[in-house]
Image: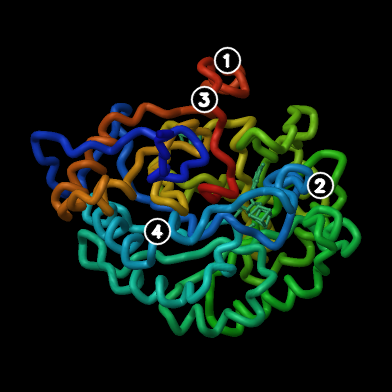
């Protein structure tokens, strides 16, 4: 008789089991990793699907009609996400960002926002609860998101020129609809709004100045992100990276800038203000200037894998811990907190600092996790 194996876990990338340590690790809000970095920021991916096909993230040739997405049963439920998030908050997380794929594609996302908005930090404050979106569904959803308790949004927008924008999202989506979404977010009070623009040399660097001019003086903070070597599918090349220093130089020549202090430890963006007082911009230099030294971010994938770095090849399987394995009982809240505590204490990731001395796939052939799977 042939044996039939039913995989319990549909995991896209390498996974480590998340064990419960024999000695409990209590959540005191003071956790630090092996390099002395605190845990402050949790990014939760709520779907691996997207209605865009940005070449730097989900290239059409790879994410085509034959690509299989996670089945619904593999996704963490909203209750599971909230339960896990609660333990992260007890360990000191004060900021939660929902992401994806495109987070607004997850059905009833407002219900999750409502549950997360009820959490309180170790100091008893509401969380800084935000969401990163491509903006395509914002015009329709902004008010409901605000009503559910979302505080603010970051919207990705890679250019104002309609032809450039359609080419970059690669599904012919018009820029006007995203601009409407930004307006709707503003009207709904989902601020301060941030705009993320990934800059790819040879593709959209001509959009830098028009974007800066468009958002200058609006209270919206435009941030320029260096094109990163995340995942294993975007065919990244260093010569397509436009260093942030060049972006700043280009803008400064037309619209004078002065550098600002970072507003919070672990902040990824370097901040610059317009000399005439008309607001600020940010640059995120993940490639040319590593900021691993104070990286306080953890990432939870759609199916409950905990990733300690954007460039990780393996996650820690929290879903099995929460659901229990082979019909066994799931972990208690204390056990879950201990497991998370131990994983964070063992963290030594600092990919961006080590970039250059590493191969695109690590030595035992494991594939780097995709950005659309764990979010930005
Ligand atoms: N779909 C949503 C969006 O686009 O805002 C949320 C998920 S997306 C993966 C999160 C952020 O990652 C976006 O701002 C996107 O521009 C950025 N991103 C994706 N791939 C990138 C890459 N290779 N380099 C730099 N940023 C990237
Ligand atoms: Fe989708 Fe966002 Fe990735 Fe673009 S960057 S393909 S919008 S998940
Ligand atoms: Fe954090 Fe990893 Fe990025 Fe360094 S490379 S800043 S450790 S996510």
Name the mark nearer the viewer: 2 or 1.
Answer: 1
Counting from the top left corner in percent of width and height, residue 301 is at 45, 49
Respond yes or no on whether mark 2 lies under 8 Å from ligand 1: no
Name the mark nearer the viewer: 1 or 3.
Answer: 1
| Spatial CA span between label 3 and label 4 | 32 Å
Name the mark nearer the viewer: 1 or 4.
Answer: 4
User: At numbered mark 3, what does the secondary structure look like: helix, strand or loop?
Assistant: helix
Left or right position of 27 against 53: left
Name the mark nearer the viewer: 2 or 3.
Answer: 3
Q: Quadrant of residue 266?
A: top left
Q: Of the two numbered discs 2 and 3 on the same chain, state the one appearing first in sequence.
A: 2
- Residue 76 image label: 4
Confirm or deny contact between disc 3 and disc 4 (CB under 8 A).
no
Respond yes or no on whether mark 1 lies under 8 Å from ligand 3: no
Counting from the top left corner in percent of width and height, residue 295 is at 42, 39
> Which residue sits furthest front?
1
- Residue 253 image label: 2
Left or right position of 296 against 159: left
| Spatial CA span between label 4 and label 2 | 48 Å
The crowd level at tag 3 (other Cα within 10 Å; few <14, some 14-19, many 20+) is some
């Amino acid at each position: 008789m042939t044996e039939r194996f039913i995989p319990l876990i549909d995991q896209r990338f390498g996974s480590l089991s998340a064990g419960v340590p024999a000695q409990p690790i209590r959540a005191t809000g003071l956790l630090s990793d092996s390099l002395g970095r605190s845990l402050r920021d949790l990014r939760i991916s709520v779907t691996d699907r997207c209605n865009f096909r940005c070449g730097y993230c989900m290239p059409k040739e790879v994410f085509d009609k034959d690509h299989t997405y996670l089945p619904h049963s593999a996704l963490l439920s909203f209750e599971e996400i909230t339960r896990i998030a609660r333990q992260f908050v007890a360990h000191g997380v004060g900021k939660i960002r929902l992401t994806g794929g495109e987070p607004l594609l997850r059905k009833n996302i407002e219900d999750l926002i409502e549950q997360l908005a009820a959490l309180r930090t170790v100091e008893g404050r509401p969380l800084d609860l935000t969401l990163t979106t491509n903006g395509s569904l914002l015009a329709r959803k902004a008010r409901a998101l605000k009503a559910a308790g979302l505080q603010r949004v970051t919207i990705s927008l890679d250019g104002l020129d309609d032809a450039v924008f359609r080419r970059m999202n690669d599904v012919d989506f018009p820029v006007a609809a995203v601009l409407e979404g930004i307006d709707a977010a503003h009207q709904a009070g989902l601020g301060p709004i941030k705009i993320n623009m990934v800059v790819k040399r040879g593709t959209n660097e001509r959009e830098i100045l028009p974007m800066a001019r468009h958002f200058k003086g609006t209270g919206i903070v435009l941030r320029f992100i260096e094109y990163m070597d995340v995942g294993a599918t975007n065919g990244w090349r260093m010569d397509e990276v436009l260093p942030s220093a060049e972006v700043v130089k280009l803008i400064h020549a037309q619209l004078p800038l002065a550098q600002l202090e970072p507003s919070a430890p672990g902040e990824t963006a370097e901040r610059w203000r317009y000399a005439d007082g008309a607001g600020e911009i940010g640059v995120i230099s993940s490639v040319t200037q590593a900021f691993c030294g104070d990286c306080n971010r953890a990432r939870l994938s759609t199916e409950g894998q905990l990733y300690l770095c954007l460039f990780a090849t393996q996650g820690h399987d929290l879903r099995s811990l929460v659901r229990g394995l082979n019909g066994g009982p799931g972990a208690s809240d204390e056990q879950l907190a201990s497991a998370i505590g131990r994983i964070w204490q063992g963290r030594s990731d600092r990919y961006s600092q080590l970039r250059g001395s590493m191969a695109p796939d690590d030595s035992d052939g494991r594939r780097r996790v995709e950005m659309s799977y764990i979010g930005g």
